[in-house]
Image: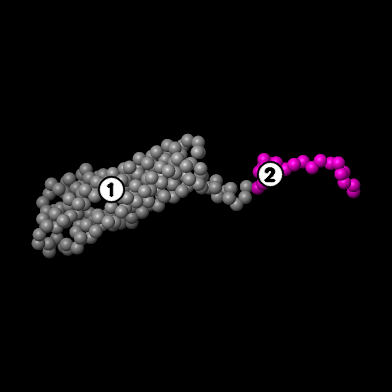
Amino acid sequence: MRHDRNATIAPTTPAATTAAAPLGATGPAVAGRSRAAGPVLATATVAMGLMAGLFFAFDVSVMPGLAAGDDRTYVTAMQNINKAIGNGLFGLVFVGAFALTAVAAWLQYRAGRRSAALWAGLATLLYVAALIVTMGVDIPLNNELAGAGDPAGIQDFAAVRTRFESTWVATNMLRTAFCTAALAALTRALLLHARPAR
């Protein structure tokens, strides 16, 4: 077989190479992250809304209602509430709001939606602030209240209530503010997610 020395070899252009190249290992992974970005962001927004709503409910109904009662009723009720809230469903939402929001920010970034990622990242930081308040102030106060013991054995309900009430109420309002701001940031991220990636 003779080779034509005058034959012209067609140059390989980047576009041709790209078109001929297989999708590869990174293609499906990126596509999967892109598809998951919206649902994860929406779920994070719901979880954050539940946390903001929980704290808000304490601000506007639970704590004002208990404040109108006597010291024994206040201490007993708060001890019971703190025991009841330590359940699996609350724990799932409490931790899930953080985990989902952080993952949502990462997925938005990986999908090329940088503006949405920034807002979801801001929401993550705001919720971290709420967690710091919770771990640093509210949980220690709850533990101190539980440490007062069975109401039947408490001698000075007024003293127990005084050490707990004002600080807990103030920091819960702070948690409400952080979570509400985080919810607003996630809502903004959702709106940006619906727009073309940039």
**Residue at coordinates 90% horizontally, 47% vertically from top-left?**
2
Query: Which residue corresponds to mark 1?
Result: 175
Residue 66 spot, x, y in % from top left = 16, 49
For marks 1 and 2 on the same chain, the one whose residue lies earlier in the sequence: 2
Residue furthest to the left: 155
Place residue 115 in its image quadrant. top left
> What distance separates the C-alpha of mark 1 from that of mark 2?
54 Å
> Is residue 155 visible to the viewer in this orientation of the structure?
yes
Residue 137 spot, x, y in % from top left = 25, 55
**Residue at coordinates 28% horizontally, 54% vertically from top-left?**
134
In the displayed structure image, the side of residue 44 where residue 22 appears, left or right: right
**For the residue carrying disc 1, how many other residues have a C-alpha within 10 Å: few (<14), some (14-19), or many (20+)?**
many
**For the residue carrying disc 2, how many other residues have a C-alpha within 10 Å: few (<14), some (14-19), or many (20+)?**
few
Q: Disc 2 marks which amino acid?
A: Thr
| Type of secondary structure dominating the magenta stretch | loop
Query: Which residue corresponds to mark 2?
Result: 17
Q: Identify which residue, 87 or 171, lies in the foreground.
A: 171
**Residue at coordinates 37% horizontally, 41% vertically from top-left?**
185
Residue furthest to the top: 195
Place residue 56 in its image quadrant. top left
* Coloration mode: one colour
Asked if residue 92 lies in the magenta stretch, the reply is no
Residue 103 spot, x, y in % from top left = 44, 50
Q: Disc 1 marks which amino acid?
A: Arg
Provide the residue span drawn in magenta: 1-22
Residue 143 spot, x, y in % from top left = 23, 60
Query: Is disc 2 placed on a helix, strand or loop?
Result: helix
Q: Which mark is residue 115?
A: none
